[in-house]
Amino acid sequence: MSDPQAVKAVLLEAGLVVDGSGGPSWPGDVLLQGDRILALGEGLRGRLPEGLTLADVEVIDCRAKVIAPGFIDAHTHDDAIVLRDPLCLPKVSQGITTVVTGNCGISLAPYRTPQSKPPLTLLGADSFKHATMAEYRAAVDATQPALNVAALVGHTTLRFATMQALDRPASGDELARMEALLDSCMADGAHGMSSGLFYEEAFAAPAEEVTALARVVARHGGVYATHLRSEMQQIIEALHEAGDSAFNAGVPLVISHHKCAGPANWGRTKETLPLIESLAQRQQIAMDVYPYVAGSTVLREDLVDGVIDVLLTWSDPHPEMTGRLLSDIAREWGTTEQEACVRLKPGGACYFQMQEEDVERVIAHPLTMIGSDGLPHDRHPHPRLWGAFPRVFARYWRQRRLFTLEQAVHKMTGMTARNLRIADRGLLRVGTMADVVVFDPETIADTATYDKPHGVSEGVERVFVNGVLAYRGGEGEAKVLARAGRMLTRGS
């Protein structure tokens, strides 16, 4: 084609179309025009819609490749990184076209804190500056990252905005101010609220506080996602609390990064999954999961038991220790691992606290979506930041055969769009937004490891965001080509 400016449409031809619904795949073509899917079918080259000629169309040969909806990362902490590093290479290179931010109770907005420090450090300590969701949305739109952003409002951020002390339940006046802030954020298009009751800043919040806020979300048609109060010994009680809070508020529930953590709890997904299925008989409920046996969060000595491996991802007082095992650091210092943990704080770590059999049960469950839960501000991040989605295909579909290709894609696309109330995404349908990924099903795989976590995945060949070719991989150096992402508002 001699004149690239003359291209009016892109024809993805002769691929295996996996449409995101979970239904059967089929060989055929997908035609993109502008930011929408214009047509689907077989042999579209010979029967283009009226107004298009072959001279107007860029044809891309997709033989032996999968054409699927762009992946939606159900659980991220990308709130700030989409502004700081809008190329978003770790995510776009996986085929991810939308990230859901504001998880675990921590969102950048609405930040109106009377506190002297921001909530936790998962998003970068100097990132909190957006007093309203409208301000955050304007910042995203002005930056235009390479992928789309759908935001949740963090319960902990609401607490910071209204309370002087967080080691107690909110007072009536404080709760009323939280409700007003949340109502404003939902009116500005937030998709729902998240909580992180596991963390110290929110642990004192009773279920009644969460339920009252979830009712605000319900009025706007949003969702409630929660990092449970416990993923260890008290996980059954925590699941009941989350289920009751969402049920009493009348809001759909998403259980964040479901796991049974700690050796004493290994195997308990045999208890938790039937309980979740039981709850699903009375209310809308879903889970997300990342495909690894290690989690990653801030340094906490209560998570250091001397049994599991703990890999340091960052430390303010001792950055030179980043990337090392806590056991080796403790041995070098002549201390216990818990004492070393205290000396390294503030910091973060990967905790190898899950059993593979539990991970497999959760990831194969029909209520489970895929979320990376990556921490992009860590100096030595968990490999899930760069590799979670291709790893699902490589390990759990291609090797372990825990589900079909269509089910794997569904867990990353249509299911997520439905559960998170993300309109016009997640399915290949005529008229839906043209977020599309083309990948090689035989080679798609993660390359990021715990030792070398910054690894571009293999097999992801093209990623379109809102109809624009945002990423090209597979030949030479992987590269983000364009930034065409948008801030997605609920129902838009």
Image: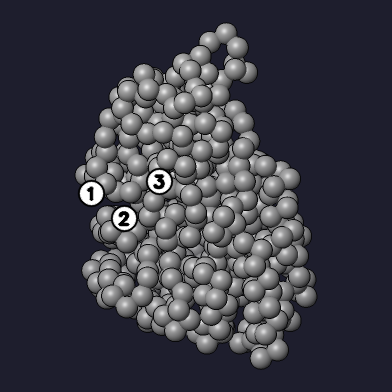
Q: Residue 78: x and y, percent?
A: 59, 51
- Tell me if 80 is positioned left or right of 443 in this view: right
Q: What mark, if any, has residue 402 been given in the picture?
A: 1
Which residue corresponds to the image point at 28% horizontal and 44% vertical from the top-left?
406
Sequence-wise, which precedes: disc 2 or disc 1? 2
Q: Nearer the viewer, residue 43 or 28?
A: 43
Amino acid type at circle 2 is Ile
- State yes or no: discs 2 and 1 in contact (Cβ < 8 Å): yes
Secondary element at tag 2: helix
Q: Nearer the viewer, residue 19 or 445?
A: 19
- Residue 1 in view in this figure: yes
Q: Residue 141: x and y, percent?
A: 69, 47
Q: Dividing the picture into quarters, in which one does residue 465 lie?
A: top right
Q: CA distance from mark 3 to mark 1?
A: 22 Å
Residue 233 lies, with reference to residue 359, above or below; the image says below
Q: Dividing the picture into quarters, in which one does residue 153 lie?
A: bottom right
- Residue 372 in view in this figure: no
Identify the residue under disc 2. Answer: 363
Which residue corresponds to the image point at 46% horizontal and 74% vertical from the top-left?
251
Amino acid type at circle 1 is Leu
- Tell me if 48 is positioned left or right of 202 in this view: left
Q: What mark, if any, has residue 427 been given in the picture?
A: 3
Q: Nearer the viewer, residue 288 or 67?
A: 67
Amino acid type at circle 3 is Leu
Sequence-wise, which precedes: disc 3 or disc 1? 1
Which residue corresponds to the image point at 73% horizontal and 53% vertical from the top-left?
138
